[in-house]
Amino acid sequence: MIDLRRRTVLLLSIAALALGAGCAAGATAQGMTAGPAARAPAEGPLRGAVAVLPVRGGRATHRLLGSRIAGSDFEQALVESLRLAAFLAPSEAEARFALQAEIVEAETVDHNPLLVVTDTSQTVDSTIHYLLTDRRSGAVLLDRRIEVPYTAPGHTSMITEKRNQLAQEGSARESIETLLDELAAIRATEPDAAGAPDAGAPEATPE
């Protein structure tokens, strides 16, 4: 009788855990923020000179349909990543360069939200389009679609939706890290005859 009660309590506890775990949480700004591995060159044109425009795209998370990347959360992560890497301008009014990001796609491969508890890995493929322009001249300094697959191994969590969230965050984070590397590679030319700095724009990478 006692064993039966214990088993019943255990099964009810597992069921409650599964029901709670099945409610998806969206990718967090903290989880998508890139560390300051890439830093703006001390004399680079982008150092302390970039403002982030409102992020386009993204989807709100539905608790029963799986974790997603919301545009507002990605924007927070992008702003903080630029700040840590010393690219962010003190204010938008002081920024010479404007960075526009659009979340084109962020899909989980073979995702089934009905499988609440599994031990399989979870992969997310994200595509994010970045456009960096010089506000003074209108020149396009960077025009890139960055595609990043990221896999959260099965051991990171027994809960399927938690691994999906980690994979969403990891894909977005590595996309921002790639962007930071490319921003750090941009160099300015000498000021032109009129005294206005000329940021030599690299050729845009074909989409």
Image (cartoon, rainbow, N blue to C red):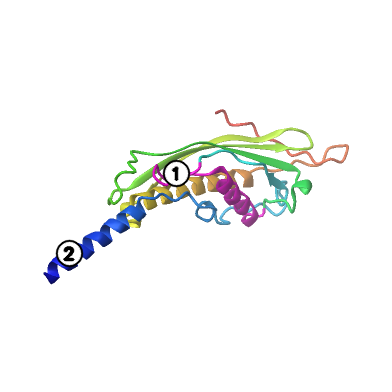
Q: Secondary structure at mark 1?
A: loop
Q: Which residue is found at the position 66% from the left and 42% from the top?
A: 186
In the rendering, at what x and y percent does residue 174 appear? Answer: 49, 47
Q: Quadrant of the C terminus?
A: top right
Q: Quadrant of the N terminus?
A: bottom left
In the rendering, at what x and y percent does residue 24 appear? Answer: 41, 49
Residue positioned most to the right: 194
Give whichever of discs 2 and 1 has the lower sequence position. 2
Q: Which residue is found at the position 76% from the left and 38% from the top?
A: 135
Going by the image, does 73 lie left or right of 168?
right
Where residue 62 is drawn, which disc sits there? 1
- Decide: is 35 above or below 67: below
Which portion, as a residue range, is magenta? 60-86
Q: How many marks?
A: 2
Q: Which residue is found at the position 50% from the left and 44% from the top?
A: 69
Quarter of the image for residue 198 reads top right
Going by the image, does 45 lie left or right of 165?
right
Disc 2: which residue? 7
Front residue (pair 203, 105): 105
Front residue (pair 201, 65): 65
